[in-house]
Structure formats: C-alpha cells, structure tokens
Amino acid sequence: MIIPRTVKIGAARWRVRIEDAVPDINDDCKEILGCTIYATETISIAKTHYGREVAENCVADTFLHEIIHAVSTTYGLELTENQVAGLSGGLLAALRDNKLDFRK
C-alpha cells in the first residue's frame, strides 16, 4: 500500500508521518503501531515495532485505523477503541478481498 503524505478529513489536511517507531504518548515505555494527534492534525505510523519490521497488511490496517480515529473526532462520532479496531479491520478486509477501488 502506498501511504500518502497527507489526507484530507473534513476541512483539515492531516499530515501522515511514517516513523521508525511510534512511542505511546500516554506511556513512554512502550511502542505502538500508530497515533493520531488532533492538536497538530498528524497521523504517525510505525514501520518497526520493538525493532521488527511491521508487515504491510498491519501498516495498512494501522493507517486506516488512525484515519477512522480522525473521522470519529472530526464528526463527533465518539467511537470506542474497539469500534475503531473492528471498523478498520473489517473495511480493509472488504476492500482488499473484493478489490474495491472507488477512484474509477
């Protein structure tokens, strides 16, 4: 999957950063796969997790997961972490399994 440098969500253009590792902003002792920072409109995605390369499918799921967090906040949906995780995994599977491309 090619991850763009920016994504437009609502009126904002969010920066997307691919980083070696993403620290948990709530707990500096652990690494996470992705993070959405609303104050700076930034989505960070890890390419490694505890020194190991993150699989492409996991990167794609994490990217979609963080986009859903941004959409949830932008539009006041108040989705829980479990709802976001379920939506990102389910949508990614449906898009890939059915080779869906909405650009055509």
Image (cartoon, helix red, strand yellow):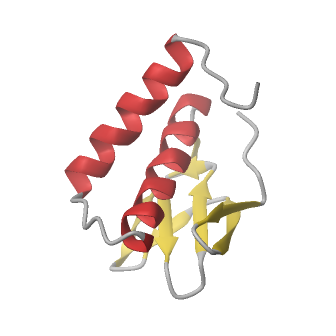
Note whether residue 29 is visible.
yes
Q: Can you give x and y, in whole percent of width and height, for residue 61 in the image?
A: 49, 39
Judge from the rendering whether residue 40 lies leftward or rightward of residue 76; answer left or right: right
Looking at this view, name the residue that lies furthest to the bottom. 39
Left/right of residue 79 with respect to residue 37 in the rendered view? left
* 78 vs 64: above or below: below
User: Quick check: 61 above or below 32?
Assistant: above
Q: Quadrant of residue 76?
A: bottom left
Image position, residue 9 (x, y; %): 59, 64
> Residue 101's spot in the image, x, y percent?
67, 24
Q: Position of residue 2 (x, y in %)?
A: 76, 39
Residue 103 occupies which quadrant of the picture? top right
- Residue 33 in view: no
Q: Residue at horizontal 55%, vertical 19%?
A: 96
Q: Quadrant of residue 30?
A: bottom left
Q: Quadrant of the C terminus?
A: top right
**Frontmost residue, 24 versus 35:** 35
Where is the N terminus found, in terms of image quarters?
A: top right
Residue at the location (47% across, 65% down)?
70
Foreground residue, 34 or 87? 87
Residue at (66% x, 29% y) in the render: 102
Please tell me which residue lies in front, 72 or 47.
72
